[in-house]
Amino acid sequence: MRYADVIVDISLEKLDKTYQYAIPEHLSDTAVVGAKVEVPFGGGNRKLEGFIMDTTDTPVFDPARTKEILSVVPGAVSLERRSISLAYWMKEHFGGTMNEALKTVLPVKQEVRNQKKRTLFLTAGPDAFAAYYETAVKRKYEARIRLLTVLKEKKELEYGEATQNYKVSPATIEAVRRDGIVAIREETVYRNPAKGVQSGEKPCLNEEQQAAVDTVWKEYEEGKRGTYLLFGVTGSGKTEVYLELIERVIREGKQAIMLIPEISLTFQTVRRFYERFGDRVSVLHSRLSSGERYDQYVRAREGEIDVMIGPRSALFTPFEHLGLILMDEEQEGAYKSEGTPKYHARETAEYLAELTGASLLLGSATPSLEAFTKAKNGQYRLLTLTKRAKEAVMPQVEIVDLRQELAEGNRSMFSRRLKEQMQERLDKGQQVMLFLNRRGYAGSVSCRACGEGMKCPHCDISLTFHKGGKLLCHYCGYETEQPKLCPSCGSKYIGKFGTGTQKVEEAVLREFPGTKVLRMDADTTKNKGGHDKIVEAFSKGEAQVLIGTQMIVKGHDFPNVTLVGIIAADLSLYAGDYRAAERTFCLLAQAAGRAGRDKLPGNVVIQTYQPDHYSIVSAAEEDYEGFYAQEMAYRRLLRYPPVSHVLAVLIQSEEEAVARTAAERIAQTLRQEKRQSEGFGTVSGPVPAELAKANDMYRFLIYVKSEDYNRLMEFHKRAAEEKVLTESAMKCNIQFDFNPLGGY
Ligand code: ADP
Ligand code: ZN
Ligand code: ZN
């Protein structure tokens, strides 16, 4: 008899271990490691699904009492051994249960056979249609009216779109079809987005690009695998380096994964890969249906493609001969998962590369402090591209002091300098981008006269506004009254401040009546394809001004944009977490890179209340090293990552008292653990989170800091145990975040 160790599909810490089941004779061929099976679970023998982690001949319990596996789930996608190792590593390093980790590494769950695309189209003539429509209106058939209205306009509609977006039930569609008004066309889709893309010309690499390729390739051919950081300004030709290396890896019979942050995953970006590799490339993105996703998965597993492009989940592409993983814009926050396990794709890619014998190439114009530090330490090989590949004039960047504007009586959102320049561009028919980096400012308090933000004296992090007029530090719990006058300069212009894209739009229309404006923010891009539509409209010149949040600074080339205005550069500096300066620097550097991308020279105006802040000055001067030095000094002083590691424990409950009790209990346990282990860093909290209540849950935070990641993992174990041992903790939702990227 053989036995299988199974992880059942329940994400509870308490049950986070394998359970042994006997493999009945008739399943001996299919119930193998990685298979999805059905098992009877617990006293009531509830039927649950699970994955086989291991098989053995030696039972751990009395064989007579060991239950049997019921069946192997038909059509389920099974896990490869490699995925199981990866899942285990992810759970250990980033928290959560094995079940959650397994679900993460298995990007598709089920075989999707039906790959038919069904499209509705009109068959009735105009008169019949009109009569039918009228009847529907008369009888108030709302769903029918919705369906007919879109069909009249678009002529065709995907079946899924009709049911999901327009909420027309299949029964209604069937009725309309029977009445002879619409018909359904079915096609088997095997989407190949590469169709029709001409193979592109391959530029001759310049000296720096060639040197980067040679370094990686020489080691690759010698059988050495490593991690490389390709550090090159925007437009320096990093993508050409990726393409060249991928081509060589493919020539060796290997495969490559190209990670790109979802937001930059536009057709413009992907096209160059199609041009080079044709239909050997596949793209993974969030708009794919489960069928399309399954398709990709199978093609990769069968070796029908060589390159998978996609966001962080593309890491889990089941290539059998992975040779190279590439990660563009490695500093992007989107590489960190928000679900559990909260893994970071960079570290996960490093481990995956090790597991598969692949090399890893990270690329960035503004590397994360983590990556650049490792490159400096020699853990990564640093490859540098210092100049733009194409002849392009560097934009002229100027910093405008908003304190001065205020002092001289200008209370408008635009400084005189920005207004003047905008006028000039509009007169010339050129385009302007206005950038608002509004993330994270929500509750912070600062002074418009001197630019000082209110900060925690212990953590040097922006304090945020809380109910009852108190200012609170979300790292250590320090609390103070909101001052009436600025503690630095005595001005009364202290308070919460911030603005939205809509307000910027209103201001533009007020100052420059009649201007055509497009806005790109969470609101205007909510709908499918909203983002692409705005980009397209703006590149066609349908508007003169594009206003937007971080979304506008990524990757797009608008040759006619000659002015970029940054409305309030320091908004992102006031975010209540230690990465505020790093984010600000990145955003400004990227935003500045948008101006004058082509033959027309470009200008950038950075408006700020803190014109001397190093993140702003360095961004304006394109001085990454300068920024790095200053920011590392700050991180070193306060022992923030990458100098040290941080574990955030978020404890949530609908009952405030329960959450508080559990949080205090966990903090106590962690402090005990700390006393037991010498030199163990710090435990702070619990404190209410910046978002003290969300979705009706009260939220408390504990932060643990340690220079040793392994110690932090032990800590995580202790805290997770509480979830099993302590009554109050059992009632809470507890999440763990290793080296969080933002505040909570
Ligand atoms: P990055 O990825 O660093 O932003 P890209 O690879 O997109 O840079 O290159 C920027 C532009 O320069 C692209 O239009 C690209 O085609 C062009 N380019 C890159 N390398 C070369 C080269 N060696 N010769 C000519 N043009 C190049
Ligand atoms: Zn002040
Ligand atoms: Zn503090």
Image: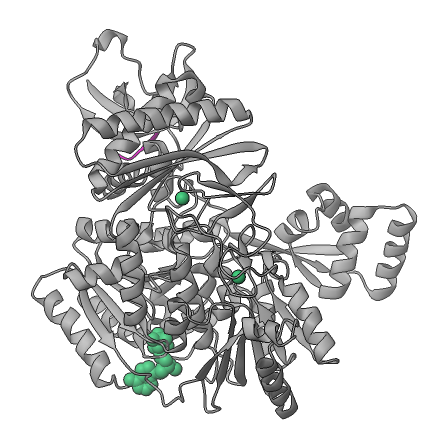
Residue that sits furthest to the right in the current view: 138
Where 89 falls versus 447 (above or below)?
Answer: above
Region of the chain picked out in magenta, as a range: 32-36
Q: Residue at x 28, y 35 (%)?
A: 34
Taken as a whole, is the magenta stretch helix, strand or loop? loop
Quarter of the figure with the N terminus = top left
Q: Is residue 611 located in the magenta-colored stretch of the structure?
A: no
Q: Nearer the viewer, residue 675 or 526?
A: 675
At horizontal 49% and vertical 91% (from top left) the residue drawn is 600
Give the x, y percent position of residue 463: 48, 48
- Is 253 on the left or on the right of 276, as rendered? left
| Relative image position of residue 23 (x, y in whole percent) | 26, 21
Image vertical order of residue 281 relative to residue 740, above or below:
below
Residue found at the very far left of the displayed protein: 222
Tell me where residue 223 appears, x and y as whole percent: 9, 62
On the question of residue 461 being in view, the answer is yes
State the residue in front, 533 or 190.
533
Quadrant containing ligand 1 reads bottom left
- Can you tell which quarter of the image residue 252 is in? bottom left
Residue name at image x 36 percent, y 73 percent: 618
Residue at 62% from the left image edge and 92% from the top image edge:
428
